[in-house]
Amino acid sequence: MKRYLRIVIGSLLLIGAYATQAQTLDKEKTIDVSKKAARGTLGHVETNDASREISLVYVTKSTNKKIKFETYLFDYDLNLLNSMEEEVEVDKARSKFSWFKFKGEEYVVEGISAEPNMMGTFVIKKKRITYNWSWFTLSYRKNTKLLDKLKFEGENGKNMFYLSHYENDATGEIIAMAGEKGKAGDMIKHYTVYHFFKVDYSLNVLSDVKVDMGSPNMVIYSAPTIDNQNPTAESPDWVVVTAPAGGNGVGKAANPIANELTIFRISPEGKIKSQTKVKSKVHSWHISGSYIDGDKVYIYGSGFAKDVEKKYWGLYDVKNFEQKFTDFQLIRLGSNSVDFVSANAVTVFTEKNRKPDDQKNPSIYNGKKVDIRDLTVLPSGDIFITAQNYKTDGQGNVQGTIFTEMYLFHFTAQGELKNCFAIDDDSRKGALIGGSVADARFYPTNSVIIGSKDPSVAYWVQLIPHHTACVTEQSGTMEITTCTPVYYPRMIKLDIATGKFTKIENYGNGEYFLRGDKPYITIENRSKIIFLGENKSGKSLWLGKLDPANL
């Protein structure tokens, strides 16, 4: 039997590390959970500000027909009020516990995918998505296999050039962006006349929206986006950004405004929610992400401000993302309007670099490629973007990405850079398992920013990868070893008005660690934090309550 190792990088909420001595948790409790709970997984956490209670539900597989749920009930002072256990038949578990997503050990979704052929023509292929359940993560592993090409004739098939698409694996459908084929005298029409259409597995075109751009454009960004008001949506909105094309083959047909971008927001139904013209302040824009909050759309990434009004994107422009960028652009849109476009020079990031007083060598963002991640907007309107530096390293026969310094870009509500906070990462070196990596440094660290009643203060909550926990499970005819990082928490209090690291605290005392899927919860209208952890053996549950205002 072949043995495979897969490294799972969870969608985490936190990041990096810096050593301090004192700990200022308001309350701290440990309890021993049952042997079955220790072998299982914390599947659900629920808080109730009205009753001031917290329930933690562990899940273990009891038999092939039954599942055991074990609940521990605490008050907000972390006192254990009760513990309960029950066995539920598998087919009744989902209706009893809406959060439990188990649909069987394996299930298959038949869907479609899209791609261009050698001539660029739009092609659709069948795909089979196989979902295998993991009792370790209480989630499905997804394996996608492309199958035969389908005969997609009609107006959207043979008359379209492929540009981009978005796959909805929950339904098997796609939303596609394609360009109309032109005749012999109009060979760039497919860069000028777009179609956004939705297609189901039976190749029914459910919707088709035509857009005439007036001049040729290139797609420079296409991705489903994070929705602050529905962060777990299976089918979020799709954001597409195009830039005017110029150069050979375009000539006088080019848009006279070289830096006029068009930003589309497409619904899961394939409808255009907004189509906005924006004058970019950079060219060769490497867009790192997009973020939606109600009718606001944020788009951000690195680029070059020099000659932006003259620099067209060629029809076959290839960006070098490893180069050193000179500027960082942030755009915020309203409903079919532009709130602001800001481009901050990398030299400004250096000028506004902030580091902890005890850190001897400053980590400075200099425009080279870094992993730019999530965007957060506080009630004050201040905008924060997290990023992490990295390098490629080898251990034996394994090459991997080791994550290093952490950055926090702080912008005003108008997109002006205020601070560039930077701090070293202290993830420790680990080992190899099954010929691959189980090293905490190979896992990225993310972060969440929490606001304060004091608008001059923000809290940078972080998880620092300490080691990995690995479990081998049977999946069909294979054994799959799943490694997930285990973290210790760090809280940083920032004075964002003066750009100071006011306080840095680590928690867990080197004895208790957090899992990335449910590392903490917030209570009392998100004003307090409770860390959820365990000791290395997993036999003891650890809870640590923290009021950031007490830092």
Image (cartoon, rainbow, N blue to C red):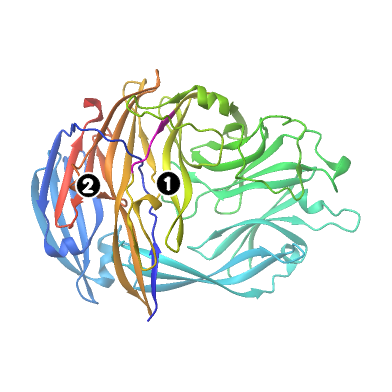
Name the quarter where the C terminus is drawn. top left
Name the quarter where the N terminus is drawn. bottom left
Classify 10 Å Cα crowding around label 1: few (below 14), some (14-19), many (20 and above): many
- What is the tally of numbered marks visible in this picture? 2
State left or right for residue 297 relative to residue 537.
right
Residue at 39%, 55% in the rendered image: 9
Q: CA distance from mark 2 to mark 1?
A: 24 Å
Q: Is residue 64 above or below residue 240?
A: below
Of all residues, the one furthest to the front in this rendering is 396
Identify the disc placed on residue 532: 2
State left or right for residue 225 relative to residue 504.
right
- Residue 43, image x, y percentages: 26, 57
Residue type, numbered disc 1: Phe
Identify the disc placed on residue 105: none
- Residue 409, image x, y percentages: 47, 31
Residue at 51%, 22% in the rendered image: 351
Residue type, numbered disc 2: Leu
Dot 2 and dot 1 residues touching (CB under 8 Å): no
Identify the disc placed on residue 403: 1
Q: Is residue 190 above or below residue 448?
A: below
What range is drawn magenta here?
421-426
Image quadrant where residue 4 sits: bottom left
Classify 10 Å Cα crowding around label 2: few (below 14), some (14-19), many (20 and above): many
Q: Nearer the viewer, mark 2 or mark 1?
A: 1
Q: Is residue 106 above or below residue 183?
A: below
Dot 2: element = strand
- Residue 157, image x, y percentages: 72, 65
Image quadrant where residue 358 sits: top left
